[in-house]
Image (spheres, rainbow, N blue to C red):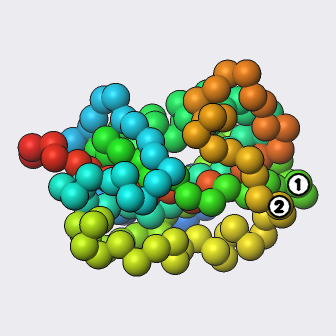
Amino acid sequence: MQRIKLFSLLLLTAFLGGCFSETPTYNGLCYPQTKDCFFTFLEESVPPECTAFAHLVMGSKAKSTGDDIASALFQEAEAKGADLVLVGMARTLTEEDLDENEFSYYGPEYAYSFQKTWLGWKFGFDQLDQADTMSNLGADSLGSGDITFDNSLLIQAVFLRCGTKE
């Protein structure tokens, strides 16, 4: 009887701890971890064999360089099994600076062929609309250690899996 009470108490503590946690848990699609992820800003450059499996908005911490942002984005992408990241709109947060990088996921429920099914940037606007001006994050600044973004950025992205055998 004592063991049942102890187990119940531990189980209740674990459930309540999850309810009050500030760190969201990723519940989306994952593949085996990858290495050497790449990025593109052009939808047309996504190879036909790529499947999209995660739509997200990354919030970068304040005072990040382009290299800091790319490293955080690639680390997240590779951990989820992406080998290509399509980067979309980036907007500046001037009212709030983030202390840590944050990732908010918007589906999809299943992986899909990017070339055949991509419907455009239709996610994350609830979050992006809270930001201010468009950012100058682009191919020349993402990955650059010479460019620092004083404010946090909100960045739309899609994680893709391309031709990797399971």
Quadrant of res 110: bottom left
Q: Quick check: marks 2 and 1 in contact, CB under 8 Å?
A: yes
Name, please, the residue furthest toward the left. Answer: 165
Dot placed on the residue nearer the N-terminal end, 2 or 1: 1
Dot label at residue 133:
2
User: Which secondary structure lies at badge 2?
Assistant: loop
Q: Is residue 50 left or right of residue 70?
A: left
Q: Is residue 86 left or right of residue 125?
A: left
Which image quarter is the C terminus in?
top left
> As rendered, which of 27 and 156 lies closer to the eye?
156
Q: Is residue 26 left or right of residue 127?
A: left
Location of mark 1 (residue): 94
Which image quarter is the N terminus in?
bottom left
Amino acid type at image mark 2: Thr
Vertical side of 21 occupied by 116: above or below: below
Amino acid type at image mark 1: Thr
Residue 51, given in percent of the width and then of the height, sits at 25, 60
Q: Residue shown at 75%/28% (left/top)?
A: 147
Vertical side of 105 occupied by 47: above or below: above
Name, please, the residue furthest toward the front. Answer: 44
Residue 70, given in percent of the width and then of the height, sits at 55, 35
Vertical side of 107 occupied by 2: above or below: above
> As rendered, which of 86 and 33 lies closer to the eye?
86
Q: Residue shown at 27%/35% (left/top)?
A: 34
Quadrant of res 62: top right
